[in-house]
Amino acid sequence: MAEGPCIELFIKASEDAESVGNCPFSQRLFMILWLKKAKFRVTTVDMKRAPDVLKDLAPGSQPPFLIYNGEVKTDINKIEEFLEQTLAPPHYPKLSCRFRESNNIGDDVFRKFSAYVKNPTPTLERKFLATLVELNAYLETPLPCELDEHPDCTKSKRQFLDGDTLSLADCNLLPKLNIVKVICKKYREFTVPAELKGLTRYLECAYKEDQFRYTCPCDKEIVDAYRCVAKQVKK
């Protein structure tokens, strides 16, 4: 294999200006590059004291952004698509989902959570919980590949959204679920109900993966990011 591309990922820094900050989009790209097994450099950007060189690289942009062989890329969805197409087999693993439904499941979780954490009414709480139930149902429903192997299977045992390996869909959803877990526990005394076995299994499996666990910001960073919002709705 020839020498790989020169890749530098710029992500949001934490309050200490060095560690990984609270940004699910930064974590998403960090996970993708790690899963691709590509050689890359990560630079944490302290936006309060961003050096002029960063302003020159991507003027007006917020992290995350990517420099690939000298070319700056700032659109997150386009970066994901570019990396999947460029860092492709046989030299790099494919991360796109085999099943279309895996790509969009869980999209509403973070939106409903955001509404609920700002205004914890019973109605918004029910809508938020409904998104978790829907996600759980998908994780418990066998995928076609599981049914091909075990036609009588009624409950999926897979680890992740699209199978037993992390995919692009997981890189998008898991950073948001981590925020949901931390904030709901801190400010709502809420944890994922035990009866949601598929979602519980999914999170347990995810936190065992280095590519997810070591790209997560610390809990305090997430709590601090939501402190102003939480004070407004604290019971």
Image (cartoon, helix red, strand yellow):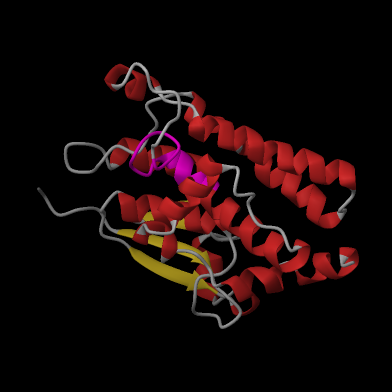
User: Is residue 105 something that shows in the picture?
Assistant: no
The overriding secondary structure of the stretch rendered in magenta is loop
208 relative to 176 in the view: left or right: left
Q: Position of residue 132 (x, y in %)?
A: 65, 41
Q: Position of residue 234 (x, y in %)?
A: 87, 67
What residue lies at 9% left-to-right and 48% top-to-bottom?
1
Q: Is residue 17 above or below residue 78?
A: below
127 relative to 220 in the view: left or right: right
In the displayed orientation, state which residue is furthest to the left: 1
What residue lies at 88% left-to-right and 46% top-to-bottom?
122
* Magenta-drawn stretch contains 225: no
User: Is residue 157 something that shows in the picture?
Assistant: yes
* Magenta-drawn stretch contains 170: yes
The magenta segment is: 159-173
Q: Is residue 185 above or below residue 140?
A: below
Q: Position of residue 229 (x, y in %)?
A: 82, 64
